[in-house]
Amino acid sequence: MAFKEKKDFPQWPIWNKEDIRAVEAVIKSNNWWCGSPAEQEGKNVWAFQSEFAEFQQAKYCIAVSNGTVAIEVALLALGVGMGDEVIVPDYTFVASASAVVATNAVPIFCDIDPNTLVMDINKVESLITPRTKAIIAVHFGGNPVEMDRLCEIAEKYNIKIVEDCAHAHGARYRGKRVGNWGEAGTFSFQASKVLTSGEGGAIICNDDFLAEEIYSISDCGRKIRDYFYAHYRYGTNYRMSEFLAAILRTQLKKFPAQHKLRNENAKYLNEKLGSIDGISIMEPTPGSEELGYYYYPIVFDPSHFGNITKADFYKKLNEAGIPTEDCYPPLHTLTCFKEVKLRKSINYSNANWGGKKSDDKNFPVVTNIYSRSVQLPQYLLLAEKGQLDYVVEFIRSLK
């Protein structure tokens, strides 16, 4: 069994004439930005916000320029600031923690569950201090965090929750779409995401006051439908453009079918790869009903594959035409969070972060998982069954 070229697998993004017509319509409209709804400036942005809120089953959606600032704005709207601590899983993209630093707060890293690969809820409570203001629940790979348990902890200590849903568009946990469990849920529409416009982000919430705060912070301190040059609080320009919103509206129409297929194909791969000794897959969190499947992580035991290194395992998959990506390095290993100048600039002197807290021995699970795992991108889960079988059989052949 073999494929001639890498292009036999689906390419991403997937677009058609509807997407082209949507962008052309924006060009011809002579309105390329989102301003006042009263002046009909930003027709596509306002429409997308309504459509995405409905899809995610939220009351409000505020579109922004990217997923990183979505987290930053959500934290600011919840009052996170100088010297506060925010608990973040150690296994995520840097933005989940850099957004914390952007608010002058301190990221506190938490190890992960070895099976679900999301934040280990059993380790959260030990990280809470009097300075803890929020928790960022990252639904890694589209796998929901145990939100019911996390919400109980947050309520006990009066801590806010921001759900980082950049990997989890459409994911559902215990009957509720992710993003609706905490105070706010943030999304990314960057080029590789399952719903994309190249760049872009959004914040969903269900609280009237919080929605107003989020909107104001992301639009220069303004209020919706108020005088354009009235600025009521500090804010900046994180608005989404009409071009991004137009593409997102057409892509959102395609998304439900793609989301369903990803979940079906992931289940198929789980059964097939799960039968190979030495291969572990990301186990869906108990209570999860749909996963976002931005990534399909594969964890391998080198002893079952001739003691192959991670680099060689990764290389062989790509040489076989199977699109494969490396995983995120654990946050505690990144230079940017060890930089003394950075730490001093946001008053880390009394923070429960850095130093010994950044040693690998304090993050045994993520250190181990990262050393022997790779990821298949979400668009591979849109492939045909024969292509998925090729992936399975090639991995089996490495034994």
Image (cartoon, grey):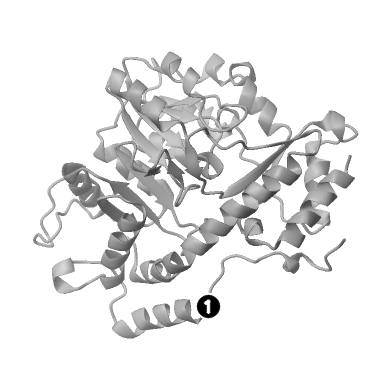
Going 80% across and 33% down the picture, which residue do you hit? 278
Going 40% across and 78% down the picture, which residue do you hit? 22
Viewer-nearest residue: 184 or 332:
184
Q: Is residue 61 visible?
A: yes
Q: Residue furthest bottom?
A: 28
Q: Is residue 12 left or right of residue 320?
A: left
Q: Quadrant of the N terminus?
A: bottom right
Number of marks? 1
Q: Looking at the picture, how far across and down is residue 19, in whole percent?
A: 46, 76
Q: Looking at the picture, how far across and down is residue 108, in whole percent?
A: 45, 24
User: Is residue 169 placed above or below 254 in the rendered structure?
Assistant: above
Q: Residues within 10 Å of mark 1 (few under 14, many from 20)?
A: few
The residue that label 1 is drawn on is 16
Going 43% across and 68% down the picture, which residue do you hit? 253
User: Is residue 144 placed above or below 295 in the rendered structure?
Assistant: above
Q: Looking at the picture, how far across and down is residue 193, in whole percent?
A: 52, 56
Q: Quadrant of the C terminus?
A: top right
Q: Amino acid at mark 1?
A: Asn
